[in-house]
Image (spheres, helix red, strand yellow):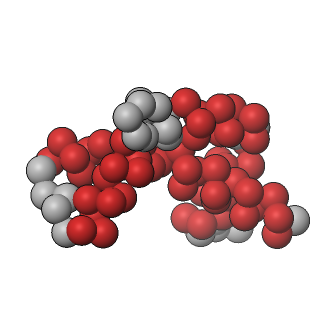
Amino acid sequence: MESKTPGDRLKGWLDKIPLAPLVVLALLLGLAPFAPEPHVWEKLKMLAGGTLARPIDIFDLILHGTPFLLLAAKLWSVARR
């Protein structure tokens, strides 16, 4: 019996997710709120400036950044095929 590596399992899980919902998720959750500026942009500026210290800000970066990371991983997987 062949043993799958964690990378193989993650790739299999990612391949099951359709691309369109990931794009919608990245646009809606990743960029929300849209005004005055998206949370992910605000948190990335805080990270670059060294002021990302409060737990709620770290949580916001993870919450709003995850859709972009999933989309990037999916696009990478599609491009490698």
Please state the total of marks drawn on the protein image.
Answer: 0
> x%, y% of residue 13?
65, 48
The image quarter in which residue 20 lies: top right
Does residue 12 appear in the picture of this structure? no
Depth check, front residue: 9 or 32? 32
The image quarter in which residue 69 lies: bottom right
Q: Relative to 54, does residue 36 appear above or below in the rendering?
A: above
At 82% from the left edge and 69% from the top edge, which residue is drawn? Answer: 80
> x%, y% of residue 23?
68, 39
> x%, y% of residue 48?
30, 69
Q: Residue furthest left?
A: 54
At 12% from the left edge and 50% from the top edge, which residue is drawn? Answer: 54
* Residue 41 appears left or right of 73: left
Depth check, front residue: 76 or 35? 35
Please state, as top left, top right, bottom left or bottom right, where the C terminus lies in the image.
bottom right
* Residue 30 appears left or right of 45: right
> x%, y% of residue 58?
24, 51
Does residue 21 appear in the picture of this structure? yes
At 26% from the left edge and 45% from the top edge, which residue is drawn? Answer: 59
